[in-house]
Image: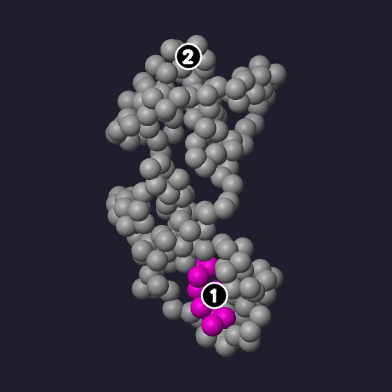
Amino acid sequence: MAHLSDRQKAELVRQHLDGVPWTRIAEHSGVTVRTLQRWAARVEAGQLARPPRRDKGASRTPAELVTAIEALAVRRPTPTIAYIHRRVGDVARDRGLPAPGYTTVRHIVHALEGLDLWAYSPLLTGAYVRADRPLSAGYDHPGTTRRLQALAAVADELGVTRNQVVLAWLLGHTPAVHPILGVSSVAQLSEAMAARDLVLDASTRARLDDVR
């Protein structure tokens, strides 16, 4: 690895502040993650000049916006960075959050390349199948009712549960999304395992994906 100036070290730290994972920066720069983190500590301690942010001094990208960017990035057909940037800007304004810059969005999207995707609690603690567990307020937006109706219709036609359709949709996605599940009974485990054999054809996926 060539010797880097303090300015170059600060620039690598800035990329992380813009939302790029350390592992991604290490891969492209040839600098180890441990070294990068040590430089970040020096920045925090004032031993390296704090790098200027590309988002004109805005705070670090909120986790919910990073999640929104990643969710948009894995859609098919693949949307452009410009489209994702516009959509996330709308989300940020609606929630009173600072909108991330184009470069930040691009870094987050590119960081997904070659990585496995995992979905935590994809069955929403039973909300798809239990009337006593309604969806949280975060999912209450125009289109939710129509999406749930489409999900119920597909499950009824295939003779499976709504949970199984959700899991099959994740596993059949490109790239595949690996669900992280928590079960409390053998029946729930069996239901989840059976979803591995459920394949949604293109027309069925389109019915689910095209609901707005």
Amino acid on which the number 2 mark rests in the picture = Leu
| Element type where label 1 sits in the image | helix
Tell me if I can see residue 148 in this picture.
Answer: no
Q: Which mark is residue 71?
A: none
- Residue 154, quarter of picture: top left
Residue 205 is situated, as x and y percent measured from the top left of the image, at 42, 28
Identity, as a three-letter code, of the amino acid under mark 1: Leu
Q: Is residue 77 visible?
A: yes
- The percent coordinates of residue 73 (x first, y second) are 43, 49
Point 58% across, 51% down: residue: 115
* Magenta run includes residue 150: no
Distance CA(mark 1)–CA(mark 2): 50 Å
Closer to the chain start, of discs 1 and 2, is: 1
Asked if 189 appears above or below 104 in the picture, the reply is above
Q: Quadrant of residue 29?
A: bottom right
Prevalent SS, magenta region: helix
| Residues rendered magenta in the picture | 8-17
Q: Horizontal placement of 94 versus 157: left or right?
A: left
Identify the residue shown where x is 64% and y is 74%: 31
Query: Can you identify the residue that label 1 sits on?
Result: 12
Q: Residue at x 60, y 85 (%)?
A: 4
Q: On the image, numbered disc 2 is attached to which residue?
A: 158
Magenta-drawn stretch contains 10: yes
Which quadrant would residue 74 be assigned to in this image? top left
Q: Residue at x 38, y 25 (%)?
A: 203
